[in-house]
Amino acid sequence: MTLKHLKSAFYTSLVMVFLAGCGSTALVLTPLENIDTMPLKISELTDAENKTWGHADLISDTIPGISLNKAYDDIIKNKKGKKVIVAVLDSGIDLTHEDLDDVIWINKGERPGNGVDDDNNGYIDDIHGYNFLGEAYNEQLEYVRIIKFKMGDNAIQEKAKAELQAELSKNKQNKERYEEILSSVKDADAAVKKHLGKNDYSKKDVIAIKTEDQALLQSVAAIKQMYNFADSIPDVFKQLNEGITYFSERLNYHLNVDFDGRKIVGDNPYDLMDLGYGNGNPKNMVKDESHGTHVAGIIAAERDNGLGVNGVANNVEIMSIRAVPNGDEYDKDIALGIRYAVDNGAQIINASFGKSYSLNSEWVYDAIKYAAANDVLIVHAAGNDGLDLDDPKNTNFPNDQADNKGTEMADNLITIGALNGKYGSEMVASFSNYGKMNVDVFAPGGNIYSTMPENNYEFQGGTSMAAPMVSGIAALIRSYYPKLTASEVKRVLIESGLSTSASVILAGDTEKTKPFDQVSKSGKMVNAYNALIMASNMSKSL
């Protein structure tokens, strides 16, 4: 959940990259412009812009999107591309969603429902991918498992215990506070409805209330205050109830040392060789298991079909790999999920997950190297704690720098920070992690509209949404310029982005600012238009 926008700071000039054109099409990368000389967007985004801002063009729209529409209009047009398989290593996906059903990967070597491993890949009935979680859904955080099973050295255990106590206290207080606010708003809402004589009322109705009744005045004041957080009181109730659910889940599952979410799966999650668990149905188990569906829609929702959203990429098949529970993922599931994706034809793996502790990180590191050896790109979310990942205290797994000294163990993993839709000092999302060594590039991730289970669509924000933006661009590159390797696609994504030296607010703290070009390795925001031109030029030189 993002914080409210803070006050704006100054804008500085935008520095763009010059590279050669692309042959007979005479296309060139976005030219050098001084953004200060352009009329900047000072008005709020319209409803239509809110739903599509991630695809906008910075120069023409003054919105820090990926220039996707421009790329389709000027470069892709009616070109025929190669089909690309993108594995979504995540929670389950709504495989029958109206905007995804035609882009879901089908394992043609497997016969559905016969209980046989027809293609001999080690997984039974894996028609659309694989479910490494079985019937499990809720799960503890990794540091809670460290305490429960007394794993790791004494220093790690003591750190985990201190973090657990702090989180238990904070989440109990937050849950109680949300419940108190909900109760107060319910009472105030009932009083206003009674006074107005109707169940549906607007902000204008509330402002117009004139009364000497002190109790009613307090209720009116409470309702007016709620309009600072949402456009309607039903939306306020929705947010408060979602908050109570979130903190309840934290206390009941994530932070509960006695909870055992893995028992139903039946394997030993700390034995990499204990195989044969899970099942071939990687669909979301419940409606609230929505993360994977939202991510999949950002990458590949069916384009121009008259339904909810357009995905970034055409020519894509989505392989669903259910390995991320409502809690921290197990290293075993992630390692095996990566290997499953590689062995079954994925060229890109979207990894919109992460955790601050990893007991068996070497299993995941080996899987990343395996993907690199097989020319598979992994796109990973930087995390949503508003932290500088270059600080050794701020770990986020998986990564490609085991020593946190800038030395990458593989050249196929790209880490993505999140942008808001407002160019300038507030464009780095307040939740987004950052780091000159550990974050490669930024992409739209704040308040992204995409697919949700049961043919629904909603806004969600996170680096989890920024990563699939990049996975989608990577899929376009691998579709239209298939000669490029995973490491070359990573290079294109990083080097073709747009850069600015503008100072940006980090973690929503106006006292914490840095030049944008210093908060990631590239200092850039990804750009589909530039990436396709650069990919074309590189492909021609091979």
Image (spheres, rainbow, N blue to C red):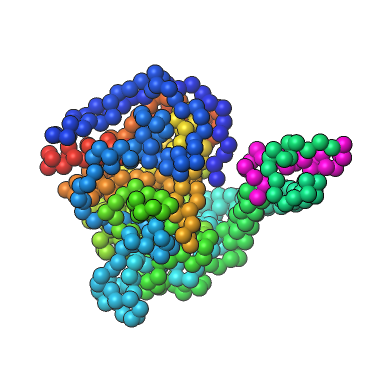
* Residue at 78% across, 38% down: 209
Residue 98, percent across and down?
A: 41, 60
Is any atom of residue 479 visible in this view?
A: yes
Of all residues, the one furthest to the front in this rendering is: 197
For residue 370, side relative to residue 242 (left or right): left
Of all residues, the one furthest to the top in this rendering is: 37
- In the rendered image, the quadrant that contains the C terminus is top left
* Residue at 57% across, 31% down: 6
Residue 65, percent across and down?
A: 39, 37
The span picked out in magenta is 212-234
Residue 257, percent across and down?
A: 59, 62
* Residue at 27% across, 40% down: 73
- In the rendered image, the quadrant that contains the N terminus is top right
Instruction: Decide which of 298, 115 is in the foreground and name it.
Output: 298
In the rendered image, residue 214 lying in the magenta stretch gets the answer yes
Instruction: Decide which of 200, 110 is in the foreground and name it.
Output: 200
Query: Is residue 442 positioned above or below 402 on the image?
Result: above
Is any atom of residue 270 visible in this view?
A: no
In the rendered image, residue 136 lying in the magenta stretch gets the answer no
Residue 422, percent across and down?
A: 47, 33
* Residue at 49% across, 57% down: 456
**Rendered image quadrant of residue 116:** bottom left
Which secondary structure class fits the magenta region best? helix
Q: How many marks?
A: 0
For residue 189, side relative to residue 444 (left or right): right
Query: Is residue 65 positioned above or below 37 on the image?
Result: below
